[in-house]
Image (cartoon, helix red, strand yellow):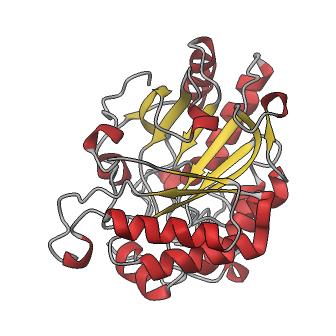
Amino acid sequence: MHYHSVEESNVTEKAGIREEQGCRLCPRNCGVNREAGKSGVCGQTAVVKAARAALHFWEEPCISGKAGSGTVFFSGCPLHCVFCQNKAIAEGTAGKYISVERLSEIFLELQEKGANNINLVTPGHFVPQIAEALATAKGKGLYLPVVYNTGSYEYRDTLRKMEGLVDIYLPDFKYMDTALGLRYSHAADYSEVAKAAVAEMVRQTGTAVFENGDEDGLMKRGTIVRHLVLPGCAEDSKAVIRYLHETYGDRIYLSIMNQFTPVSGLADYPEINRRVTKQEYEEVVDYALSIGVECGFIQEGETAEESFIPAFDGEGV
């Protein structure tokens, strides 16, 4: 598969899947006519495909809470990270095709099941359809906060299509080093794209708002930036954390994760074909604390387990 990446300035303000020149939703800028049934770099046509819609309990405490997050896992992804833990859906092998109307029903069904929020996982390549489904569901009584859960390889213009529909952004910031972005996500421009994307997210949400003003409660609005510590990449992790803290301070929450799980297919990437050591993770966390990071989440104990990866069996779809 050939991966594209271009400067956002080369894309029109009205970037979107329904333009005549093809799909321009993400920085791959592949230009494929997905409306005609062709698959973009994301691996998907214009028909929504989802692999699971169920209560999920493994997000940050302010997202999952006790009742769970109403999570919809969309099939396909523009990044195709070599270490992806959700490869079955990222590569599009798992999932069911559904209509926009059905997607709106799924949102309402998750609300009826007691979900704390609606959590859209890897939604970027279906933004026009999701926006339509959310508007329909809100018109039929959907009142839960909406979470946009993304790898951050997103155009600002695409994110702006979700303004007013999304309450919480849950983006990754994977790397600062261009070499790492190229090697592991086929995207040398990853950090620059992610910087612009996160800036747009924070602009939309502002400072975090919690239920009853209690930071130990559920988040109602805000941005939580996730960073997964990779084996042997502690210095890059520090660079990511330093950038985010210096840029946003307490306007965002940081989630520093140690759950990297080696998956099959990493033979060509032996340097990351292992778990992150306790020493590596603690070095990154200690650094975050040393520069004054106060608003955030860390993981304790053994988290690099397959149990964090749900079954993409079509439940709830």
In front here: 85 or 246?
246
Q: Nearer the viewer, residue 200 or 76?
A: 200
The number of numbered badges drawn on the structure is: 0
Note whether 139 is above or below 238 in the view shown. Answer: above
Seen at 56% across and 22% down, the residue is 66
- Looking at the picture, how far across and down is residue 28, in whole percent? 52, 72
User: In this picture, is 68 found above or below 28?
Assistant: above
Left or right: 117 in relation to 222: left
Farthest-out residue, bottom: 179
Residue furthest out toward the top: 112
Q: Quadrant of residue 156?
A: bottom right
Determine whether, in the image, residue 172 is placed left or right of residue 127. left
In percent of width and height, residue 310 lies at 34, 35
The quadrant of the image that shows the C terminus is top left
Q: Quadrant of residue 11?
A: bottom right
Residue appearing at x 18%, y 77% in the figure: 268
Farthest residue in the left direction?
Answer: 267
Q: Is residue 79 visible?
A: no
Residue 117 locus on image (x, y percent): 65, 29
Q: Is residue 313 visible?
A: yes
Q: Is residue 11 above or below residue 172?
A: below
Q: Residue at x 55, y 60 (%)?
A: 172
The answer to whether residue 155 is left or right of residue 42 is right
Picture coordinates of residue 81 (x, y %)? Answer: 37, 66
Quadrant where the image shows the N terminus: bottom left
Name the foreground residue: 218 vs 23. Answer: 218
Residue depicted at 14% across the width and 72% down the height:
267
